Amino acid sequence: MNIHPSAIVDPAAQLGCDVEVGPFAIVEAGAQVGDRCKIGARASVKSGVTMGSDNTLFEGVVIGGLPQLIAPPGPPGRVIVGDRNLFRENATIHRAMTEAGVTRLGSDCLFMVAAHVAHDCDVADRVVLTNNVMLAGHVTVGERAFLGGGSAVHQHCHVGRIAMIGGMARVTQDVLPFVMIDGDSGDVVGLNRVGLRRAGLSREEIAEVKEAYRIIYRSGESFAQRLTMLGDRFQEGPAAEFEPFLSNTSRGFVRERRTPPGSTLRVIEGALESSSERLSDAASRRAG
């Protein structure tokens, strides 16, 4: 182990092999840090944290902070972190609200500068939270999801796997697997095709996901009928994930952005007509 002289490591903390602890870092009693983890300057690993191997914490990271609650909290729960995660500067991960609860992070995730994961969240493997992303309490994020800078997810929402959320988006309902959310409107704007290909889905699987997407957003059927159509049509493969996801939603799901056909063109045409009239009036005055 390589522990800087200014670091504070409680004797009751458990550190694995080849752990590095930087200047002024803190590892509290009861924290468990796996092999080859690197804890940067001024980072903190607090009580109640169990961390796997090969995780890297940059400067100012805090893992295991108390949940942010208005009511006086009781004994907090735990934080469980997988392997090979990267926490950039000032990322924060909070413990669960109750003693039996867990805030859980998977493996191979990237938490960029000032990303925040609140109490009782469940973040799967290979998730990317870019700068200043905010997950409220009890949020679930599926594997390979990507959340753009400054986006915020309301408590108890579920972000499906391989979903992509644009920067500054405000997510207040569940995000279906495989879709993209526009950061400006906060609406669905299609499938995350690049993410699907990178995840190794075949052309046939992507085609089925596209078909399921059209049933959900463009069939015009009732919600119950759409669930039946999805269940009957897709029994296996990625497209089969939509039906159980929708059946278990408690907050509803993010709608698709729909723009009236030709609306932008009509605005432009109106602006051009108005501009032409002004130019014509000006020319008439000069001629007069």
Image (spheres, rainbow, N blue to C red):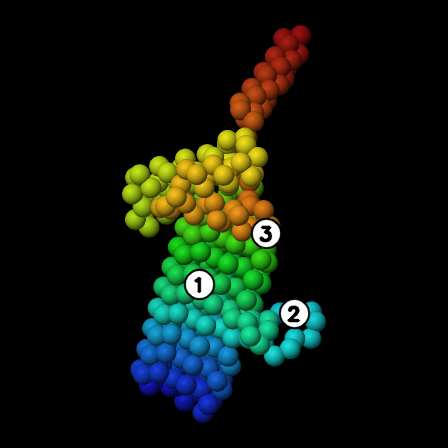
Of badges 1 and 2, nearer the viewer stands: 2
The residue carrying mark 2 is: 69
Of badges 3 and 1, nearer the viewer stands: 3
Along the viewing direction, whichever of 287 and 237 lies nearer the viewer: 237
C-alpha distance separating marks 2 and 3: 23 Å
Against 238, is 7 above or below? below
Give the number of the disc on residue 111. 1
Residue ID at (51%, 81%)? 47
The residue carrying mark 3 is: 250
Residue ID at (56%, 38%)? 223
Q: Is residue 200 visible?
A: yes
Against 24, is 124 above or below? above
Of badges 2 and 3, nearer the viewer stands: 3
Q: What's the amino acid at mark 1? A: Phe
Which badge, 3 or 1, is on the more N-terminal residue? Answer: 1
Which badge, 2 or 3, is on the more N-terminal residue? Answer: 2
Q: Secondary structure at mark 3?
A: loop
Q: Mark 3: give few (<14), some (14-19) or many (20+) Cα within 10 Å.
A: few
Residue 183 pos. (x, y %): 52, 45
The quarter of the picture where the N terminus appears is bottom left
Instruction: Check contact, mark 1 vs mark 2: CB within 8 A.
Output: no
